[in-house]
Image (tube, rainbow, N blue to C red):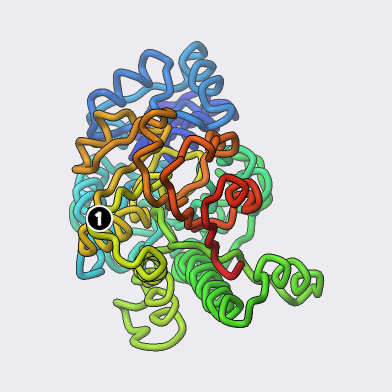
């Protein structure tokens, strides 16, 4: 039997950008929180009251507050943290292999430790995006097998997907309702009651963990398909000499039109990954597959267009602006830069990468050639590709690039007139 406490204790398993933020929010709303992670540096940072997650507005202050109030701590010992908890929230990555099959390596290891520390009456909630059915049929079954406890009676099991955006996690938690599903009525009630206090946001209760799991992946598939549509329209707009940006702005004034923006590719932990949770589990054909093909093909299409314009890219010095998968974040998972680099090297170009979020050493560690954004170095560049439009690039002086022949704006973010004024050709997506 658990020791009676003044405040309920939450174990947050996985202290990445989502996990740490959630842990800090729970602490600020009256819970004692123990974070568990496999990274010693993360544990030391949290226990010193320092957030290892950067560029997340408001998080530094919440971590300091939780530390000072002795309501937020961290440990490498997941089993012990779980054994002390009333609620366990799991935010451990589930990824995909190169062949796009689901990779459970990290989650399976975490679940083993959770199961070993699980005690009666604990509520376990998975927040990591999962294939439909995994909470109940994969992880619930394993929790029962190791702990000897029965899900839904001895302990309670729920799923509630994170629905937030890097750099906006705290504001997004207030903006978007929290979807919650349980394996039975009591699991749903307990998880829902926890979130009402822990994040103080609107709650959408759905009929099962499967419904909640499906809803999160469906969101990602919708965005992927919509972006693919925008990319197809952008390509066609170019053929018709039509400005796709104006088209989208005009079309979206109709309330049933929600066309996204085209782009040189789709990156990050979500959109390029989670559609495979359907596609590898029975959704064998259709729009989800076509969207992945279209969006991952945009990098090759861009390089072909650049190659044609330059009459070949052999020995040309090409600068990619942005290693991150999107603007103003330090995260290169599934970044379009990787696709661009592969395509450009096949054309025998000399490829350089600049990103203000990464040091030169970090860029080199990723087997890329870093570029110093100076006036002298800029004189040697033949082609620029805008891949992630960080704030730093808003003031970039294209007058430095005296030998540059072409700027390919993969995000339609630049003032094309400012580029052309320097005698540099400009190409965008559907512009």
Residue with the mark numbered 1: 349
Of all residues, the one furthest to the bottom in this rendering is 285
- Residue at 58 percent of width and 48 percent of height: 419
* Image coords of residue 91 (percent x, y): 38, 46
**234 and 424: which one is in front?**
424
- Visible residue check, residue 133: no
- Visible residue check, residue 110: yes
Q: In the figure, 307 relative to 173: above or below? A: below
**263 and 396: which one is in front?**
396
**134 and 250: which one is in front?**
250
* Image coords of residue 241 (percent x, y): 63, 77
Residue 339: quadrant of the picture: bottom left
Horizontal side, residue 259 vs residue 65: left or right: right
- Residue at 49 percent of width and 64 percent of height: 216
Q: In the figure, 328 relative to 35: above or below? A: below
- Residue at 52 percent of width and 40 percent of height: 390
Q: Secondary structure at mark 1?
A: loop
Residue count near mark 1 (Cα–Cα under 10 Å), binned few <14, some 14–19, many ≥20: some
**393 and 349: which one is in front?**
349
Quadrant where the N terminus sits is top left
* Image coords of residue 401 (percent x, y): 45, 40
Residue 13: quadrant of the picture: top left
Residue 29: quadrant of the picture: top right
Quadrant where the C terminus sits is bottom right
- Residue at 60 percent of width and 39 percent of height: 199
* Image coords of residue 233 (percent x, y): 58, 78
């Amino acid at each position: 039997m658990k020791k009676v406490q003044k405040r309920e204790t939450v174990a947050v398993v996985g202290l990445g950008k989502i996990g740490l933020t959630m842990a800090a929010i729970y602490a600020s709303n009256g819970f004692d929180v123990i974070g568990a992670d496999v990274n010693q540096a993360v544990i030391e940072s949290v226990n010193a009251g320092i957030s290892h997650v950067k560029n997340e507005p408001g998080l530094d202050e919440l971590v300091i507050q939780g530390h000072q109030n002795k309501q937020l701590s961290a440990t490498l010992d997941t089993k012990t943290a779980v054994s002390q908890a009333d609620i366990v929230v799991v935010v451990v990555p589930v990824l995909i292999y190169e062949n796009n099959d689901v990779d459970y390596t990290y989650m399976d290891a975490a679940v083993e430790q959770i199961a070993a520390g699980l005690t009666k009456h604990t509520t376990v909630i998975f927040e990591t995006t999962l294939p439909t059915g995994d909470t109940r049929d994969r992880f619930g079954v394993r929790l029962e097998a190791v702990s000897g406890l029965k899900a839904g009676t001895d302990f309670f099991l729920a799923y509630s997907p994170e629905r937030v955006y890097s750099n906006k996690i705290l504001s997004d938690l207030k903006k978007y309702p929290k979807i919650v599903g349980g394996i039975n009525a009591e699991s749903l009630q307990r998880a829902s009651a926890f979130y009402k206090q822990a994040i103080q946001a609107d709650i959408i209760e759905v009929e099962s963990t499967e419904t909640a799991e499906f809803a999160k992946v469906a969101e990602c598939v919708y965005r992927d398909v919509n972006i693919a549509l925008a990319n197809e329209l952008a390509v066609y707009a170019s053929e018709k000499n039509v400005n796709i940006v104006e088209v989208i702005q005009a079309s979206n004034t109709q309330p049933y039109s929600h066309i996204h923006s085209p782009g040189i590719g789709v990156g990050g932990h979500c959109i390029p990954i989670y559609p495979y949770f359907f596609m590898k589990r029975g959704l064998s054909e259709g729009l989800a597959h076509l969207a992945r093909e279209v969006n991952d093909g945009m990098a090759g299409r861009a390089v072909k267009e650049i190659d044609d314009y330059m009459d070949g890219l052999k020995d040309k010095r090409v600068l990619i602006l942005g290693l991150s998968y999107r603007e103003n974040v330090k995260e290169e998972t599934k970044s379009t830069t990787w696709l661009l680099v592969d395509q450009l090297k096949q054309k025998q170009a000399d490829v350089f990468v600049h990103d203000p979020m990464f040091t030169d050493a970090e860029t080199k560690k990723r087997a890329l050639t870093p570029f110093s954004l100076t006036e002298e170095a800029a004189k040697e560049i033949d082609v620029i590709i805008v891949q992630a439009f960080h704030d730093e690039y808003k003031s970039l002086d294209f007058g430095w690039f005296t030998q540059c022949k072409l700027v390919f704006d993969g995000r339609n973010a630049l003032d094309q007139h400012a580029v052309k004024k320097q005698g540099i050709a400009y190409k965008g997506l559907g512009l």
